[in-house]
Amino acid sequence: MGTVIFKGLRAHKRRLVGTFLAVFLGVAFLSGTLVLGDTLRGNFDNLFTEANAGTDVVVRHASSLSTDPGEPDSQRGLIDASLVDTVRGVDGVAAAEPSVEGFGQLVGKNGDKLGGNGPPTLAGNWIDNRDVNPYRLVEGRAPRPGDEVVINRGAADEGGLRVGDTTTVQTPEPVPVKIVGIATFGSADGLGRVTFTAFTLESAQQHLLHRSDQVGTISVQAQPGVSQDELLNRVQRVLPADVDAITGSELTTENTNDINEEFLDLFTTFLTVFAGVALLVATFSIYNTFSIIVAQRTRESALLRAIGAGRRQILVSVVAEALLVGIVASAVAILGCCHSCSTVFCSATVDRPRLLSERSR
């Protein structure tokens, strides 16, 4: 019967092409959705791990500004700027850098506003301490006077902006600025399509907060030999009741979860629904194709019965043909999908031991 099965496949290969394509497309769509979702999650996790590698503790307001329990709680109130010196005086702290962040939409070279159709448009302050700054200066220098800024490379490429150009940042009032540096978020051009404009701390407080006595967060770096948990306990002792602190590892997990809740879960669910529809259509196509093939092979089945084949053997031969087509088409779809995604995944994967060694230095 094995010989009969393979000869039957060869004899009806044209009729099975439609079935093969239906299985291939359905499985490729579903496996591609799953692989893409996992790849994006892994890439964002690695990106945040790289960006937060030098931050051991983050001091921030204890309460979230979000009133919806289902929304990410990354947006929080402001804290007193005097806490920066208090945290710097804690035993085991190597550095403590204040951070300010708010709305800031860049205007491109052609006058069009960048971003704003989904991804956030952010502005903040440039942190000179490379270890706790998630952005890496790759061109130019850090801002010095109040009208100088550093922008992320993704925004610069999108807006046709270069070092030395002058433009405007909406905060929301228009602020004329001069671009003196281009930066990456970790090793990426930016956090997705998020645009980021970095002022000096004083300018960021002036344009984003309209006050100089408060900051958004404080990024803390530990001295060699001090663990994140140990430093967290020491820092928490000097904080007021309305101010909280978390470790850098917890911050990375929180950032990744926020991305999942805001974008990836919805994105992968949307694609999975379409993949399910594709598989459902493929199921009907496969059923109709094999129904036609079986009906057209009535004489062949009768001849096999006449030379001694049993009903069970004929049924097994038809089922085996269906399984072979399904297995081969599924394998080709999965291998093709994994091959297309492997290059993206490998190129975006960060070497964690290297990050840990850089963080320890």
Image (cartoon, rainbow, N blue to C red):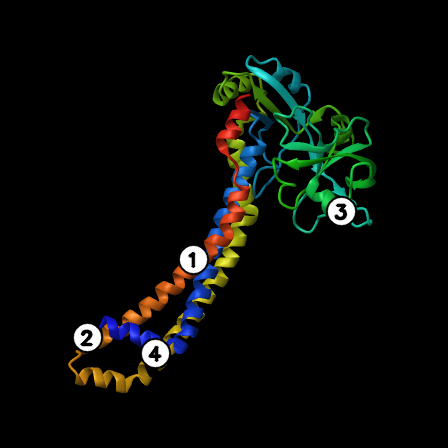
Tag 3's secondary structure? helix
For label 1, the residue is 334
> Which tag, 3 or 1, sits closer to the chain's start?
3
The image quarter containing residue 8 is bottom left
For label 3, the residue is 159
> Which tag, 3 or 2, sits closer to the chain's start?
3
Q: Are marks 4 and 1 in contact (CB under 8 Å)?
A: no
Vertical side of 340 occupied by 233: above or below: above
Q: CA distance from mark 3 to mark 4?
A: 59 Å
The image quarter containing residue 216 is top right
Q: Are marks 3 and 4 in contact (CB under 8 Å)?
A: no
Q: CA distance from mark 4 to mark 2?
A: 21 Å
Q: Say whether residue 319 is left or right of residue 112.
A: left
Q: At 62% from the left edge and 19% from the top edge, which residue is drawn?
A: 95
Vertical side of 85 occupied by 318: above or below: below
Q: CA distance from mark 3 to mark 2?
A: 69 Å
For label 2, the residue is 312
Q: Position of residue 72 (x, y in %)?
A: 56, 41
